[in-house]
Image (cartoon, rainbow, N blue to C red):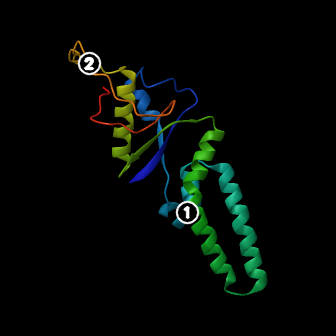
Amino acid sequence: MTSYVVMAPPEFSDLAGDAQESDRLQFVPDRFSFLAFVFSIVWLLFHRMWLVLLGYLGVTLVFELVALASNSAVGGVVTFLVSLLFGFEAQALRRWSLEKKGWRVIGIANGSDLAEAEMRFLHKEAAALSGPVARETPPAPAEKPRFAPTPIIPRIGDEQVVGLTLGPETRQ
């Protein structure tokens, strides 16, 4: 099951208004992104993460220049590790980029896929908007006997013993 961070655009008011408002929400998964690992630059361009793209290009350029200067296979391993690290942190960087653009976190949803997470989140929000659920009134308590037996409270000297009773429990 994957956790999704639900983010709303800056001009988003709430879900109580137009039903189309829910289409503008972004559900950002909190998991490894295989597409970001394999196609890092294309993934960054697709999500319009320009600042992160510049940082990624800068880091990979530095590692590539170091690899060319050293003439060893270490450069390939380091590039693989940078891509692996980016795959793990890509969704966190996506949330960060959205927050920089004014988006805000409005909730968290869980689901086995995106559709289930959307359904769970919107169902929970619809229940919250409809107000508290009217509950049945609890049944009236049974009538107490007129002469209730007094509990036996053990004492040692002038002090009451806590937690020790002599006989059946009489509290209600």
Indicate the position of residue 138 as horizontal and vertical percent values: 25, 19
Please tell me whether mark 2 sits on a helix, a strand or a loop. Answer: loop
Which residue appears at 73% of the width and 68% of the height? 61
Q: For marks 1 and 2, give the CA distance.
A: 70 Å
Residue 53 vertical placement versus 102 (above, below): below
Please tell me whether mark 1 sits on a helix, a strand or a loop. Answer: helix
Residue 172 vertical placement versus 104 (above, below): above
Amino acid residing under circle 1: Gly
Q: Callout 1: 10 Å neighbours few (<14), some, many (20+)?
A: many
Query: Is 167 placed left or right of 102 in the picture?
Result: left
Image quadrant occupied by the C terminus: top left
Indicate the position of residue 131 as horizontal and vertical percent values: 37, 19
Residue 3 vertical placement versus 107 (above, below): below
Indicate the position of residue 160 as horizontal and vertical percent values: 47, 32
Which residue appears at 50% of the width and 33% of the height? 157
Query: Is 154 placed left or right of 140 in the picture?
Result: right
N-term mark: 1 or 2? 1
Instruction: Out of 146 and 49, give the one closest to the viewer.
Output: 146
Give the image quarter of residue 85. bottom right
Amino acid residing under circle 2: Ala
Query: Is 162 placed left or right of 146 in the picture?
Result: right
The residue where tag 2 is placed is 148
Which is in the foreground here, disc 1 or disc 2? 2
Numbered label attached to residue 130: none
| Residue at the top extreme of this rendering | 146
Query: Is 28 placed left or right of 81 in the picture?
Result: left
Which residue appears at 39% of the width and 37% of the height? 121
The residue where tag 1 is placed is 87
Image quadrant occupied by the N terminus: bottom left
